[in-house]
Amino acid sequence: MGYRVAVVGATGNVGREMLNILEEVEFPVDKIHAIASRKSIGVKVSFGDQTVACEDIAQFDFSTVDLVLMSVSGSFSKEWSPKIGAAGPIVIDNSSAFRMDPDVPLIVPEVNPDDVSFAHKKNIIANPNCSTAQLVVALKPLHDRAKIKRVVVSTYQSVSGAGKEGMDELWDQTKGVFVLGAPPPKKFPKQIAFNVIPFIGAFNEDGYTDEEAKMWNETHKMIDPAIKLTVTCVRVPVMVGHSEAVNIEFHEPLDADEARDLLRESPGLVVIDKREDTGYMTPKEAQGEFPVFVSRIRNDPTVEHGLNLWVVADNLRKGAALNAIQIAQLLDERGLIGTKALA
């Protein structure tokens, strides 16, 4: 038996990727609906062999579907997700709107799958921030083994995390550098081509950005609030794929060899860690792939129990669309889609 599924924000990068992955993993879909704002009504998107025309969210009857995948802004989701959930379907929301709501589970299936049992409270499940999703997949098995005390993360986040406008700006500036000079930035605060920008999101009063705060807040909610975590988020001139340099301090002993073996056996992870010139993953190689990749696993001799990791994933997949579909698969496996979700 298949489900009636709606993708809201179907014309965006992540929305289109959601449609691709639904087909790719053969999620049981009986009927697919592409939903967008009024300006995108009639725009065609692909779902397998089908071409689907976008429907107006304001006119759509959400009581006619079982599952809704949201790929929209936080403000848009705050307005629409509660209405949609109240109409019956479970909403899997990719925005930041409900991630820290105590009545909304924040899920990465490899990390905290049992939290889906709380989905019925508002019929909303939150998808984490793209950089958090790949981080917690790597941290969880290590925390279970040796209890993490402190984590220091530096991110190297691709422009696709800022949507199509970010990708277009990198492309246009890169071309322009070799002709008449790079056009001035519009999406990013400074030139992104041949540059890095140590600022993503908006500044908070403490000098950190909201993107950085998301990472520790979401890690605390999904794994353990006792973990001390500090972050610097950096935008880099890469089209797709986020990378992270991760330094971890543990309460208990855990050396690189044991960690390597443990990560190899953990769900959602692939270890590529050879001490040779090409024995690690880069974001370019991770593009289009499902797993989170871990490389450069080393002991940190500056603390009693410490490791360094290099963590890479496709941010449009595991960081967004794939994780949402994996949540849907988890709901399906546990019989929580449809009327059972409201029981």
Image (cartoon, rainbow, N blue to C red):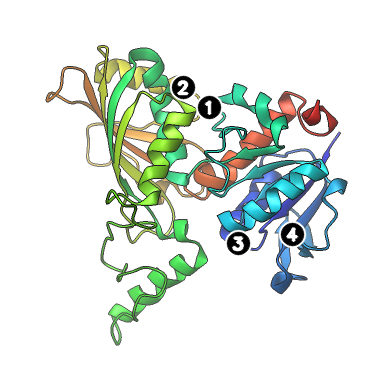
Query: Which residue is pictured at 22% across the width and 23% down the height?
Result: 306
In terms of sequence position, does the residue under pointer 2 or pointer 1 come before the other?
A: 1
Badge 3 vs badge 2, beta-carbon distance below 8 Å = no
For discs 3 and 2, the disc positioned in front in the rendered view: 3
- Where disc 3 sits, the SS reads loop
Q: Which of 2 and 306 is in front in this view?
A: 306
- Residue 109 position, x and y percent, is 57, 29
Query: Which residue is pictured at 76% across the width and 64% down the height?
Result: 54
In terms of sequence position, does the residue under pointer 3 or pointer 2 come before the other?
A: 3
Q: What separation in Å lies between label 2 and label 1 (alpha carbons)?
A: 8 Å
Say left or right for 237 vs 32.
left
Q: What separation in Å lies between label 4 and label 2 (alpha carbons)?
A: 36 Å
Label 2 neighbour load within 10 Å: few <14, some 14-19, many 20+: some
The quadrant in which the C terminus is found is top right
Label 1 neighbour load within 10 Å: few <14, some 14-19, many 20+: some
Label 4 neighbour load within 10 Å: few <14, some 14-19, many 20+: many
Dot label at residue 110: 1
For label 4, the residue is: 35
In terms of sequence position, does the residue under pointer 4 or pointer 3 come before the other?
A: 3
Residue 151 visible in rendering:
yes
The kind of residue on which mark 3 rests is: Gly
The kind of residue on which mark 1 rests is: Glu
- Where disc 1 sits, the SS reads loop
Say left or right for 232 vs 44.
left
Badge 2 vs badge 1, beta-carbon distance below 8 Å = yes
- Residue 88 position, x and y percent, is 81, 41
- Where disc 4 sits, the SS reads strand
The kind of residue on which mark 2 rests is: Ser
Dot label at residue 12: 3
Q: Which of 214 and 15 is in front in this view?
A: 214
In terms of sequence position, does the residue under pointer 4 or pointer 2 come before the other?
A: 4
For label 2, the residue is: 266
